[in-house]
Each structure stands twice: as structure tokens, then as C-alpha cells.
């Protein structure tokens, strides 16, 4: 079965330090990869996506993500965390084959940035 | 700004009393989705519309129905809400094209059941 794993329920990082939120996937072919962020009592906001090309993708709010095909990973990164980055982060994958209108979601990682 | 709007933001209903949640969009996207999200879990897709074509998920209870009268509006009807239906309901839209189109979400409706 196709799946997306976010191995850490929670990530804690000090403000100003780099952050990484991990995502691996098990999907056939070369899927499209996405990161979304959710602040409390809000909907999900699109951060960035990987389609093809450069393995380092830049997105909103200073976030970037590194695609690694051999490890089937798409880790979210930021060089210097802000307290305002504290939120819930979801990795999602859209398979290329079949119905490409649906996403396979990870379970989410709660990021806490401490002052 | 083009956006996805959900009303109301908070809805309280009684056990077994039908409730309707609404979603509108100014993005002119042809796909509209309804998700259920419980306590910081991953969103669970209930169904989606591709234009007027309704696509139900296999595990969506019959209690949940949807209507899309036009491109801009989509409704989620819960015919007889149970306590287990208390959740955040998220509406999202996307444009059909290459599969790399992101989904755009509204801020959700938090449904409480008394």
C-alpha cells in the first residue's frame, strides 16, 4: 500500500537554530511531493512542492525541502527557526498514476520553536 | 484576494439534528474537496467533486452527503450527526492540470455535537 511517513510526532528546536522535519514515502513511480503547514484553528497552507529538477526546493516563509530519490525522502528544512514557525506540518504525496486529484497524507509533525 | 471561504467557523448542533456546512471559492477551481480532521490528525478525505462529477471515498459513512450547485459553492450535509462526527471540517480546491497543482484550503468549520 502507498504511504507517507513522518517519523517524528514532535520536533523541538531553539529559536535561531536550523530545523528539519522528516518525511519519507512509499509510492510507486515519481510522485509529486508537497509540504503544508497548519496553525491552530486554521486550514492548511501550502508551503512548497517538488515536481522534478533541482533536489532542493525553496518555498514560503524561508522554508526549503530536500528531495532524495534513493531514500524516497522529502525533508523540510529551515536554516534559522522562528517562534512563529511553531505549527503542525504535513507532508503529502500525489502519485503520478491513477487519480491524480487525491493526496496521500502523512500523520503530521508538531513543531515547537522555543524562545 | 482569491480564496476559499468556509462558513460558519464554528457550528454547534444537537445529536441527530441535520447540519449543513458551506464552502465557497473565488479561485474558479474545478475540483473541490471535503476533509474531516480530528484533533491534530491528518486530514481524512470524505469526497471530492471534479466539476459536477461526485467522487465518494469508500469509507465515508452514508451519513455524509455533499452538493455542488455551481463552480463556486459546495456543501457538506451531515444527516444525523453523532458524537463521533465532532471534528474540524476542511474544504479545499485545486485546479485540474498536471498533478503538481497544490490544494488551497479554507480555515475550516469546527463542528461540536451536544
Image: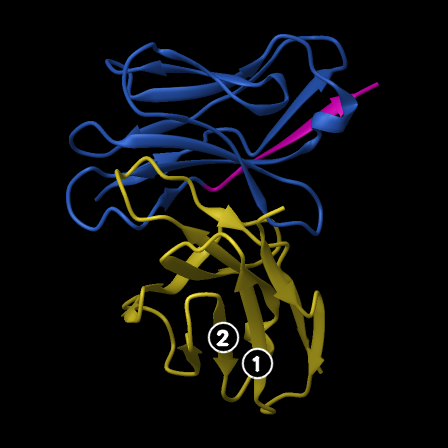
Chain colours: A blue, B yellow
Circle 1 SS class: strand
Q: Which chain carries label 1?
A: B
Residue A110 magenta-drawn? yes
Residue A63 is situated, as x and y percent measured from the top left of the image, at 57, 19
Residue named by callout 2: B76
Q: Name the residue under label 1.
A: B20
Q: Residue at x 38, y 77 (%)?
A: B61
Q: Residue at x 44, y 57 (%)?
A: B44
Q: Nearer the viewer, residue A24 or B9?
A: B9
Left or right, B62 with reference to A82 = left
Quarter of the image holding residue A72?
Answer: top left
First in sequence, mark 1 or 2: give its number: 1
Nearest the viewer among A70 and B78 is: B78
Q: Mark 2 lies on which chain?
A: B
Instruction: Classify mark 2: helix, strand or loop.
Output: strand
Name the side, left or right, on which A114 lies relative to B104: right
Q: Main secondary structure of the magenta part?
A: strand
The magenta region covers: A107-115
Q: Position of residue A52 (x, y in %)?
A: 27, 19
Q: Which residue is drawn at 77% across and 14% down?
A: A15
In the rendered image, residue B9, in percent from the top left (x then y), is placed at 70, 65
Is residue A38 positioned above or below A72 on the image? below
Of residue B112 and residue B67, the one placed in the foreground of this image is B67
Residue drawn at (58%, 91%), measured in percent from left and top?
B16
Give the residue furthest to the bottom.
B17
The one nearer the camera, A54 or B87, is A54
Instruction: Estimate the spatial distance between the alpha carbons at disc 1 and disc 2, rounded to whole Å.
Output: 6 Å
Q: Mark 1 and mark 2 in contact? Answer it, CB < 8 Å.
A: yes
x and y percent of residue B7 in the render?
A: 65, 69
Disc 1 crowd, CA 10 A, few/some/many (<14, 14-19, 20+)? some
- Judged left or right of residue B34, residue A94 is left
Mark 2 surroundings within 10 Å by alpha-carbon count, few (fewer than 14), some (14 through 19), many (20 or more): many
Amino acid at each position: 500500500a502507498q504511504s507517507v511517513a513522518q517519523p517524528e510526532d514532535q520536533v523541538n528546536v531553539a529559536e535561531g537554530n536550523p530545523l528539519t522535519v522528516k518525511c519519507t514515502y512509499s509510492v510507486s513511480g515519481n510522485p509529486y511531493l508537497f509540504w503544508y503547514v497548519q496553525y491552530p484553528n486554521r486550514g492548511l497552507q501550502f508551503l512548497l512542492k517538488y515536481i522534478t529538477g533541482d533536489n532542493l526546493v525553496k518555498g514560503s516563509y524561508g522554508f526549503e525541502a530536500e528531495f532524495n530519490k534513493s531514500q524516497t525522502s522529502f525533508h523540510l528544512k529551515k536554516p534559522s527557526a522562528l517562534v512563529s514557525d511553531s505549527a503542525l506540518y504535513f507532508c503529502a504525496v500525489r502519485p503520478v498514476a491513477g487519480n491524480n486529484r487525491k493526496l496521500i497524507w502523512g500523520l503530521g509533525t508538531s513543531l515547537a520553536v522555543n524562545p | 484576494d482569491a480564496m476559499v471561504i468556509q462558513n460558519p467557523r464554528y457550528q454547534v448542533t444537537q445529536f441527530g439534528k441535520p447540519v449543513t456546512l458551506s464552502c465557497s471559492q473565488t479561485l474558479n477551481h474545478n475540483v473541490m474537496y471535503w476533509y474531516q480532521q480530528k484533533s491534530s490528525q491528518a486530514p481524512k478525505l470524505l469526497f471530492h467533486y471534479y466539476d459536477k462529477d461526485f467522487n465518494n471515498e469508500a469509507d465515508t459513512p452514508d451519513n455524509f452527503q455533499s452538493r455542488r450547485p455551481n463552480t463556486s459553492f459546495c456543501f457538506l450535509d451531515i444527516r444525523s450527526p453523532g458524537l463521533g462526527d465532532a471534528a474540524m471540517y476542511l474544504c479545499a480546491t485545486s485546479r485540474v492540470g498536471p498533478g503538481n497543482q497544490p490544494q488551497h484550503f479554507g480555515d475550516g468549520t469546527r463542528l461540536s455535537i451536544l
